[in-house]
Image: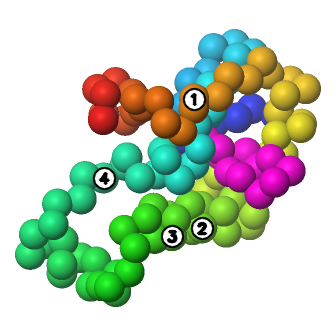
Amino acid sequence: MNVELFTDLIKDDRGNYYVAIDKNDKELTLVNAMLERSYIEVLEFNEDFKKKYTEYEHQFIGKIAMDKVRHDVVYALKEDGHGRMYELEAVIRLYRVTFIDMIEFYRNPRTGGRIV
């Protein structure tokens, strides 16, 4: 098992999904996938946003990030090169795992480590 950063998903026994954001030998740092996906793109409430996300009008803003996670889950389950799905139990047998708490200031590596 070779967990790929930002791509592979790790599922726990309660149906939560995680993404590895850092890997050092046999150590992994995981964060909730919805949190990580919500930091991929900055959403600005302007005309471009309205055009790009028309289908989300009158819906919760969290649905955008959840749809990204749902997309990733579907493709990871297909095992066709768009990421893999691992069970957390299997991962913790091979790696020392650290979790980032959902309510910490998240320093997303995709943003160059800025606190966002």
Provide residue 107's location: percent of width, then percent of height: 39, 27
Residue 28, magenta (yes or no)? no
Q: Is residue 74 above or below residue 90?
A: below
Quadrant in which the C terminus appears: top left
Q: Is residue 48 visible?
A: yes
Q: Residue furthest top?
A: 25
Tell whether 55 sits left or right of 62.
left
Q: How is the image coloured?
A: rainbow
Q: Residue at x 70, y 35 (%)?
A: 3
In the picture, the disc for residue 100 is: 1
Residue at mark 2? 70
Residue 41 circle label = 4
Q: The disc labelled 3 sits on which kind of residue?
A: Asp
Q: Amino acid at mark 4?
A: Glu
Q: Secondary structure at mark 2?
A: helix
Q: Is residue 61 above or below residue 98?
A: below
User: Where does the magenta region start and end?
Assistant: 7-19
What is the distance, in whole Å, between disc 3 and disc 4 at their CAs? 13 Å
State yes or no: discs 3 and 2 in contact (Cβ < 8 Å). Answer: yes
Task: Name the residue at 28% across, 77% down.
Answer: 53
User: Residue 90, how many percent across, how many down?
Assistant: 89, 36
Q: Are marks 1 and 4 in contact (CB under 8 Å)?
A: no
Q: Which mark is residue 67?
A: 3
Q: Where's the N terminus, which quadrant?
A: top right
Give how far apart the Cα atoms at labels 3 and 1 are.
22 Å
Q: Amino acid at mark 2?
A: Arg
